[in-house]
Amino acid sequence: MTFDYVLLGKKLREARESLQFDIYEAAARLQISSEDYLKVESGQKKATGDQVVLLASLYQRDFRYFVTSDYPSAESQIQEMFRLNSSLSKNDRIAIQQFIRLCEYESFIEQEVFHKRFSPPPNYSQREFDHSYFKKQGEDAARFERERLNVGLLPIRDIFELIRNQGIHVFKRQLEDRNISGLYVYHPTAGHCILINYLDDLYRQNFSAAHEYCHALFDSNLGQEVTYLNKDTNKSEWRANSFARNFLLPKKRILEDYSPVTEYDDWVNIIRQIATQFRVSSQVVIIQLGEINWIDEKMKQRLKNDRKLVIKSKEKFDPEIPDDLSTGQRERLTQVIRSGLSWHFLELCTEAYRRGEITYHKLLEILSVPIENGYQLLHEIRTFIEVVDL
């Protein structure tokens, strides 16, 4: 069967344009002229295998996507995401595409190397609710999920671990667009994939993770979505916000543990206490207090504007960073997470390498680390893991 170089060129052009690379950047990667590169994209010039590998690395795609006509990928979902969110910067587009590659790698290592099998989370879009109110659907689903996961009314210590335990891939990454809180992609082979903007406050990240988890439960048929701060104009966003609030902070727990107070300072103290206990922002607590009619709209606005209810970063707990690390190690691991990796992913990859399931070069490729920087990063990862395992 004759290889279709025209189709290959079309895929290369679409990948390049989706990430906003210009012709000269692509040509420079192959060390050819821009004219010759255009011939590659048009199918007039046959790309070599090595050239396709180089471009696959540049465009953050699996090599097999370019050379196989029916290779399963999230290409249509990502193209739709970029089309609907055309203001995304070049760097954020690249970050999102790298996130997709991480999800593909994580899925491969979990399933093919460690033979992990997960029970998929329920699809609530197929559930028949006895009402059509989206906010109420979110609240109901939050209660159902707490029951299904045997969480009860307890605070969720690590929302990211809870999500991963269901086979959902979740990563953090600092994006340039601070208005993006998170995004969701349903990958044809990797399944549910969630990216959280690491630029956000830690408690906001918890909320965003629960919010995107709701999209995984209800909206996988859409294929993708991007969540922007303060932009909840559609019903699915109302539902996801309601789910996140009630999943992280059940109203029933507030009613069981607390009582309404009369003094303003007492409200401030209660809100700070609940926020710290449940690892949510004060704003979430205030909304929940309003939902159970303990405070009126005037009090809500006053509390929302009170600087005393801003919980400082040093008072917050990041579940993605092990407790046993030193301050310096925590800072270095924070930089690694900010660049898109996760502690869970690092452990998976290094364990696969230790077992001889992947080579050193494959490990560096997965971690997107140049060979010259590989030893230093692996040394630090080994130190992190040894400290935590002590």
Image: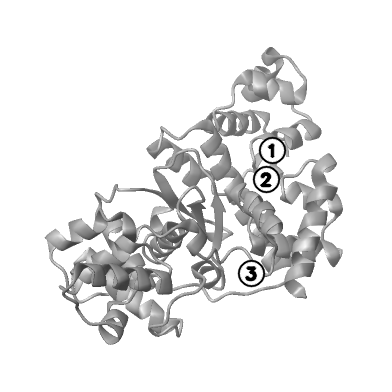
Query: Which labelled disc corresponds to residue 62?
Result: 2
Q: Position of residue 132 (x, y in %)?
A: 19, 67
Quarter occupied by the N terminus: top right
The reply to whether dot 1 and dot 2 touch (C-beta < 8 Å) is yes
Residue drawn 76% across the image and 47% down it: 365
Which numbered disc flags the more N-terminal residue, 1 or 2?
A: 1
Labels 1, 3: front one = 3
Q: Position of residue 215 (x, y in %)?
A: 39, 60
From this view, report whether residue 45 is shown above or below residue 91.
above
Q: Position of residue 222 (x, y in %)?
A: 39, 54
Quarter occupied by the C terminus: bottom right
Judge from the rendering whether residue 174 lies leftward or rightward of residue 233; answer left or right.
right
Q: Nearer the viewer, residue 79 or 383?
A: 383
State how far apart marks 3 and 2 are (Cα).
35 Å
Judge from the rendering whether residue 5 lies leftward or rightward of residue 169; answer left or right.
right
Residue drawn 30% across the image and 48% down it: 230
Q: Which residue is mark 1?
A: 56
Q: Disc 3 on helix, strand or loop?
A: loop
Labels 3, 2: front one = 3
